[in-house]
Image (cartoon, helix red, strand yellow):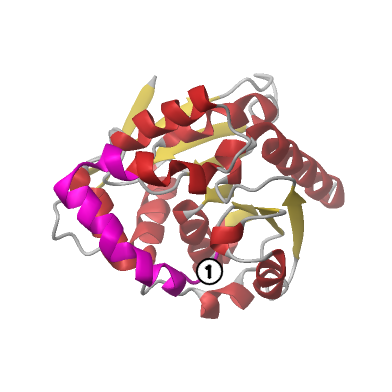
């Protein structure tokens, strides 16, 4: 079931709540933040690993899923999406949360953690990097395909490079259908922003214990050494490599990633007890 909350005039964010915690316990909250052209449904495979110990919120970012669609001229930015997340957390009456972000969601959650350190217990980043200028050469062709064909055609043409070789064809088709339903104006708007994204200055400001995950052969998003180079600038962080050749590892390897996330959270909880 989807819930909705108004975060600004004319802007409503949708979310799902998965809570299988013991009713007599005061469980903490984890918010999962998805990537471009997705929704909270992208995190389905993670829920069984987390929802027994935590209240799990799967957010639909503005412009996607069941949240308010955005016009083509909307001025997208990582900072604005972090502001949305702040308004969402405040609107739910939460003071401090655990954050998990994949791809675009990873950028948003890192930005949030850097600028609102007192609101974050822990941060988990899956298949995201901090600077996207390397995308610039490929963006015009992808935008052309979206404009002239469809979002589904773009999703279909890019899915294997996104998901790697290990995901079964039936799962790839599901992801094509899922991302293909995203509003064209939202996807185009975000793509026009991507090449200018750079949150490098924010990285040393992240104070929360942080887990960064990438695959052993993420290719498109850079080498494991490149990930390590910026991950090490997060003061209290660790890097985990997931075997595979996908850069969208939270989708291609949900069980492996969620298991690593659950273990990380358990370690942090032990430190705090």
x then y, percent, for residue 84: 35, 54
- Residue at image position (65%, 73%) is 230
Q: Main secondary structure of the magenta part?
A: helix
Camera sees residue 60: yes
Q: Which x, y percent locates residue 3? A: 35, 27
Tell me the SS state at disc 1: loop
Task: Name the residue beneath numbered marker 1.
Answer: 130
**Quarter-wise, where is residue 59 in the image?**
top left
Q: Which residues are magenta?
A: 129-154
**Crowd rating for badge 1 (residues with CA inside 10 Å; few <14, some 14–19, many 20+):** many
Q: Residue at x 69, y 45 (%)?
A: 244
Q: Which residue lies at the image location 57% right of the left edge and 49% below the top edge?
A: 99
- Tell me: residue 234, above or below residue 100: below
- Picture layout, residue 73 above or below residue 85: below
Asked if 262 appears above or below 192 in the picture, the reply is above
In this orientation, does residue 10 appear? no
**Residue 250 at what x, y percent from top left?**
59, 41
State the image quarter where residue 142 is shown: bottom left
Judge by depth and name the residue closer to the eye, 197 or 54: 197
Q: Is residue 169 magenta?
A: no
The N terminus lies in quadrant = top left
Q: Is residue 156 left or right of residue 255?
A: left
Residue 9, percent across and down? 17, 49
Q: Is residue 174 left or right of residue 192?
A: right
Residue occupying the point 72% across, 37% down? 256
């Amino acid at each position: 079931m989807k819930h909705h909350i108004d975060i600004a005039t004319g802007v409503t964010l949708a979310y799902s709540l998965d809570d299988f915690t013991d009713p007599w316990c005061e469980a903490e909250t984890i918010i999962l933040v998805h990537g471009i052209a997705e929704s909270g449904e992208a995190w389905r495979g993670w829920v069984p690993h987390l929802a027994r110990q935590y209240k799990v919120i799967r957010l639909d970012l503005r412009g996607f899923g069941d949240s308010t669609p955005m016009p083509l001229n909307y001025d997208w930015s990582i900072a604005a999406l972090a502001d949305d997340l702040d308004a969402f957390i405040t609107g739910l009456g939460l003071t401090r949360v655990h954050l998990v972000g994949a791809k675009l969601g990873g950028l948003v959650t890192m930005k949030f953690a850097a600028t609102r350190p007192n609101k974050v217990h822990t941060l988990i980043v899956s298949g995201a990097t901090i600077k996207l200028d390397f995308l610039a050469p490929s963006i015009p062709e992808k935008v052309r395909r979206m404009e002239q064909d469809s979002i589904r055609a773009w999703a279909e043409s890019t899915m294997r490079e996104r998901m790697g070789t290990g995901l079964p064809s039936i799962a790839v088709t599901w992801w094509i259908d899922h991302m293909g339903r995203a509003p064209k104006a939202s996807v185009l708007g975000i793509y026009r922003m991507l090449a200018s994204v750079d949150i490098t200055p924010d990285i040393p400001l992240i104070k929360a214990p942080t887990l960064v995950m990438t695959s052993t052969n993420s290719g498109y998003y850079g080498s494991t050494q490149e990930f390590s180079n910026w991950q090490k600038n997060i003061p209290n962080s660790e890097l985990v490599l997931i075997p595979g050749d996908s850069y969208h590892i939270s989708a291609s390897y949900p069980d492996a990633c969620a298991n690593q996330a659950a273990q990380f959270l358990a370690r942090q909880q032990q430190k705090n007890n």
